[in-house]
């Protein structure tokens, strides 16, 4: 029998395999229809790697709440915990309205989740891979090229490491904002580098292109919460809108989810802008739909601490030996950067995550209306 969640922090699983098993059991118990989309390859325990889709409600829905986790692999520890805790704790008396559906997508990057990476099996940052409008998989910000040596050392990990003094020098020289933008925007020229958007559609991109139109039917309205971690202040969260969100949509989402949490795609409101992220791609895939995409970002450590952990793991992955202590400790650092072990952080992040899912279900499907505090 599966263990159920008694405190929200317990919804965190120790690895992808356990997260997947728990998710599938909880979804099935709640009457969701399950489907697994294998992406090929295996996890460290020899397990299959798959995106799991769990659907409740109409087969061809017109109003949908989508909740996705793990587009950035290791960030799936939180997203999966939110999905599990919601499935195990949320109760609603009324049936879903006609045409309404809930779609949970578990582990959009199963490879990265299983192997504790932010990237897929080809080192692709999936949230930089969903290019649209004829954009090509080429080019990099000018300053990324200048910082490549610092970000992506092409040798096995050494001690002591010179990252911190050099990073602080770069920040002082180029300015914090400019460095952040150059580093995180997405690049298409350094296949072993951080934030590499790929040289073509990734496997996950192809799978979603194939299945999303079926999962969402001809939906006229969608609220999509895509869970991420590692950006923002410790213990806080923000809902980042895609660049395709129009002003009326933005105003509506601010009213629903709180003006203090919802950040527009305007460069003045966000830490950096990106290319190839999932939101605009969803808008383009469902052009006749009112598609409200919200990237739910939960803050952990400082930007430089997160970047340092990403860099160390990436260096160890490409240049270190897989079983070495240095590689194992780089993986552990990465996990801590994106899924802190602190029980207070975990409890609060899952609690807020569930509230977001419940709010989306209240707005779109009229569930939880008794506890809906929209006023
Ligand atoms: Zn992310």
Image (cartoon, grey):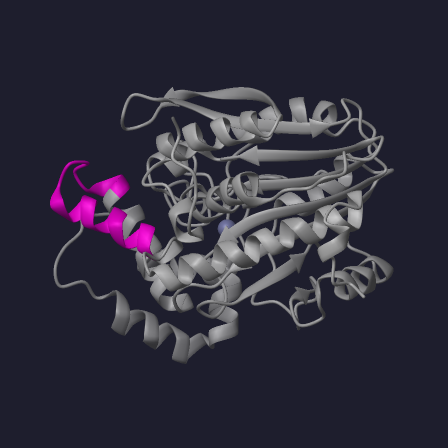
Farthest bottom residue?
172
Q: Quadrant of residue 230?
A: bottom left
- Using the image, determine if residue 75 lies above or below residue 61: below
The overriding secondary structure of the stretch rendered in magenta is: helix
Q: Quadrant of the N terminus?
A: top left
Task: Give the side of residue 119 with respect to residue 248, left or right.
Answer: left
Q: Is residue 333 magenta?
A: yes
| Count of numbered badges drawn on the protein | 0
Q: Nearer the viewer, residue 62 or 141?
A: 62
> Is residue 135 visible to the viewer in this orientation of the structure?
no
Query: Could you tell me which residue is drawn at 32 percent across and 61 percent down?
Result: 308
Magenta residue span: 317-336
Residue 114: image x %, image y %?
A: 36, 34
Q: Residue at x 29, y 49 (%)?
A: 313
Q: Is residue 274 above or below residue 174?
A: above
Q: Position of residue 51 (x, y in %)?
A: 52, 28
The residue under the point 41% across, 62% down is: 345
- Which residue occupies the foreground of this view, 117 or 362? 362
User: Percent position (x, y) of residue 58?
Assistant: 77, 26
**Quick check: 348 left or right of 368?**
left
């Amino acid at each position: 029998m599966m263990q159920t969640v008694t405190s929200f922090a317990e919804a965190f699983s120790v690895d992808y395999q356990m997260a997947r098993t728990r998710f599938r059991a909880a979804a099935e118990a709640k009457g969701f229809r399950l489907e697994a989309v294998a992406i090929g390859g295996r996890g460290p325990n020899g397990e299959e790697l798959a995106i799991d889709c769990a659907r409740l409600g109409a087969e061809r829905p017109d109003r949908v709440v989508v909740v996705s986790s793990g587009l950035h692999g290791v960030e799936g520890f939180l997203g999966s915990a939110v999905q599990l805790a919601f499935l195990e704790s949320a109760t609603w008396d009324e049936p879903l309205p006609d045409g309404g559906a809930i779609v949970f997508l578990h582990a959009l990057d199963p490879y990265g989740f299983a192997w504790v990476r932010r990237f897929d099996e080809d080192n692709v940052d999936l949230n930089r891979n969903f290019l649209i409008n004829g954009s090509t998989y080429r080019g990099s910000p000018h300053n990324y090229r200048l910082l490549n040596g610092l970000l992506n050392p092409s040798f096995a990990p050494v001690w002591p490491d010179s990252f911190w003094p050099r990073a602080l020098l770069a920040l002082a020289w180029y300015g914090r904002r400019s460095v952040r933008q150059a580093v995180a925007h997405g690049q298409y020229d350094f296949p072993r580098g951080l934030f590499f958007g790929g040289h073509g559609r990734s496997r996950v991109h192809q799978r979603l292109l194939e299945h999303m139109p079926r999962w969402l039917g001809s939906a006229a309205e969608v609220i999509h919460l895509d869970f991420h971690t590692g950006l923002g202040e410790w213990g806080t969260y923000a809902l980042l809108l895609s660049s395709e969100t129009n002003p009326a949509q933005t105003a509506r989402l601010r009213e629903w989810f709180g003006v203090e949490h919802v950040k527009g795609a305007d460069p003045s409101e966000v830490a950096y802008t990106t290319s190839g992220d999932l939101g605009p791609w969803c808008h383009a895939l469902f052009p006749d739909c009112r598609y409200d995409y919200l990237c739910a970002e939960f803050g952990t450590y400082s930007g430089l601490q997160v970047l340092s952990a990403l860099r160390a793991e990436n260096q160890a992955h490409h240049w270190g030996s897989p079983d070495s202590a240095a590689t194992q400790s780089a993986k552990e650092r990465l996990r801590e950067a994106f899924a802190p072990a602190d029980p207070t952080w975990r409890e609060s992040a899952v609690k807020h995550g569930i509230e977001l899912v419940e709010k989306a279900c209240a707005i779109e499907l009229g569930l939880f209306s008794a506890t809906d505090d929209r006023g």
